[in-house]
Amino acid sequence: MTHYIGIAGLHGCMPQTCDVYETAKDAAESLAQTHDLGRKRAATLRRYLYLELNLRRDGNEYAEITACECSNPSQHSDSDEVTA
């Protein structure tokens, strides 16, 4: 079953946050809320599944959403569960 991994962090480093979601929309909404993104930047993240962030303003340098079809989605989650 396809699931989506939402990550954010600093370029060249392990992600600061990583969670798994049932849909790309859910991942985008969660990352947008975590980083207090406005409507325009949230829409860009939903559309392109990637967004360059401002470290000073957002606390991370990027946010990214990737699709995955592995058999154990919880392995991607900081909280060990699929977020709906």
Image (spheres, grey):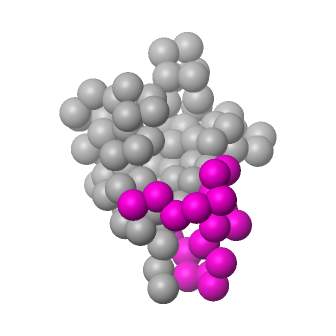
Q: Residue at x 42, y 54 (%)?
A: 27
Q: Is 34 positioned to the left or the right of 76 in the image?
A: left
Res 48 seen here: no
Res 19 seen here: yes
Coordinates of residue 6 in the picture (x, y in percent):
52, 53
Q: Is 3 positioned to the left or the right of 36 in the image?
A: right
Coordinates of residue 32 in the picture (x, y in percent):
38, 37
Q: Is 33 rendered above or below residue 69?
A: above
Coordinates of residue 72 in the picture (x, y in percent):
65, 78
Magenta stretch bounds: 67-84
In front here: 82 or 10? 82
Q: Is 34 rendered above or below residue 14?
A: above
Q: Is 67 rendered above or below residue 70?
A: above
Going by the picture, which residue comes out furthest to the right? Answer: 13
Q: Is 81 positioned to the left or the right of 1 in the image?
A: right
Say if the magenta span includes residue 76.
yes
Which quadrant of the structure image shows residue 36? top left
Coordinates of residue 64 in the picture (x, y in percent):
51, 50
Say if the magenta span includes residue 83.
yes
Q: Residue at x 60, y 72 (%)?
A: 73
Going by the picture, which residue comes out furthest to the left? Answer: 39
